[in-house]
Image (spheres, rainbow, N blue to C red):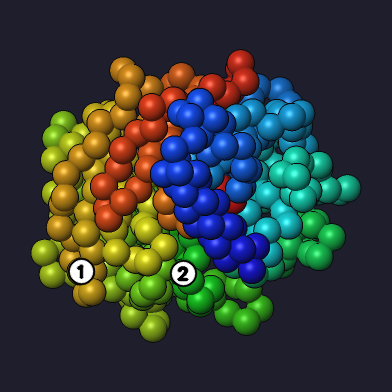
Amino acid sequence: MRFVTHRRLEAALVAAAAVVASAGVPAAASAAAQAAPVVGHVYVNDNTVGTNTIGVFDRHADGTLTPHAGSPFAAGGAGTGAGLASQGALQISPDGRFLLAVDAGSNQISVLRIKPDGSLSLVPGGVASSGGVLPVSVAIHGGLVYVANAGAGGSNYTGFRLGANGRLSPIPGSTVTLAASAAPGDVLFNGTGTKLAGAEVGTSLIDSFTVGFDGRLTAAAGSPFQAQGLGPFGSEFRPTHPDQLFVSNAHNGAGLGTVSAFTDSPNGTLTPVAGSPFPDQQTAPCWVEITHDGQFLFTVNTASGSISRYRIAPGGALTLLGSTQVRGTSVGAVDARLSPGGRFLYLDESAVGKVGAFAVADGNLTELATSPFQLPAGAAPAGIVVT
C-alpha cells in the first residue's frame, strides 16, 4: 500500500506543479514550487570501507534530489569500498517498513527501519550473517528473504524469514551451494513468490527454483540452464507476467550485448522466447529494470555508458527502441530503479559516487538538467532503491 500511495501522490504533485507553471507564475517561483514537495526517497548502498552506510536523498515531485538531513546512515556491517558487480544489493520490504542492505565486507545483512520522514535506524539485533561469503544480492517476497553470496568458499543462496521486528532468522536447510566460480550477480523472486531465479555471472548459468511453503527451494528439472550469452547478469521478472524472465548477457564483447527473454513454466523450466536473445548493440548490458506496466525494459550498458530501451510484446519478445547516453564520461553506470509512479528512473553512477535522474515517457528517457546528484565522499555505491 505504501507504494500505491506514493504513486498517487507523485502523480498529483506533478500535476499540481504543471498547473502552477501554466498560471504565469514567475520562473524562479515556479521552479521553487515544483522542487518543494518531497514525494519519496532514494536510498543507495554506499558499500563504504569499514562501517557501511546508506545514502539517502529526498525525492521531489520534479524528479530532482536533495540530500536528506542526517544522511548517510550507518548500517550494521562493513562494505568493501569497491563495486559489487551485482543487482539487488539493497531492497525494501513489501510493506515499506524495512531496508535490507548487503554488508559485503563483513559477510552480513543489515536491516534498517524506515522512518516516516525517510530517515533510517538500525533495527535492534538487525545484523545477521549472510550464511556465506561476500553477499551481493537480496531477494524479498513477503517475509521470505534469499541472499546470494558470491565469494569463493562460501558461494550460495541462503534463505531467511524477516520477522515483524525486522530481525532475520535463517531457514534451516535452505542453503543451495554453488560452484566456487559461480559468482552469482542477482537473485530474485517472481511477482507471486512461487519462483526464484539466480544469475551465475562466472559460469554463464541461470538457476531456477520453485519455492515451497516452508521457504525452501526445489531446483527445476534441467536447472541450472545455459545462458544465451556470456555473463548473465541483471535479471527481472515482468511485473505483469510473473512467468516471463528477462536476463542481460553482459560479457559478449564490444557492441555485442544482448538481453534474453524466457518463459518460466509452472515447474520452473526456462524456455527461451522466440527470437531470443535480442541485440542491444552496446557493450556490457548489466542491470535490468522493467516499467511497472510491463511495457518497456531498460538495461544499463556499463561499458558504453548508456541505457538501452526496449518495448516488450505480450509474449515477451523485445524490440530495441534505441539507447540513451548517460551524461559524463566513465561514470560507472550500474544499478537503476524506477520511482513508484514510473515517471523517473534513478541510476547508480558507481565510478563517480553520484545518482543520475531521468524523466520517463512512453519508453523514452531524458536526463534531468540538474542530474547527476552527489553522494557523500567515500561512497562506492552498489545498489539503489526508490520510494
Q: Is residue 90 left or right of residue 85?
A: right
Q: Which residue is mark 1?
A: 313
Q: Position of residue 335 (x, y in %)?
A: 44, 40
Depth check: 325 or 371 in front? 371
Specify whether residue 149 is in view.
Answer: no
Specify whether residue 194 is in view.
Answer: yes
Could you tell me the amino acid type at mark 1?
A: Ala
Mark 2 secondary-structure assignment? loop
Residue at image x 16%, y 31%? Answer: 254
Residue 138: mark: none
User: In the image, is residue 275 above or below residue 152?
Assistant: below
Could you tell me the amino acid type at mark 2?
A: Asn
Q: Position of residue 25 (x, y in %)?
A: 49, 35
User: In the image, is residue 69 above or below residue 227?
Assistant: above
- Label 2, label 1: how far apart the Cα atoms are: 19 Å
Residue 190: mark: 2
Precedes in sequence: disc 2 or disc 1: 2
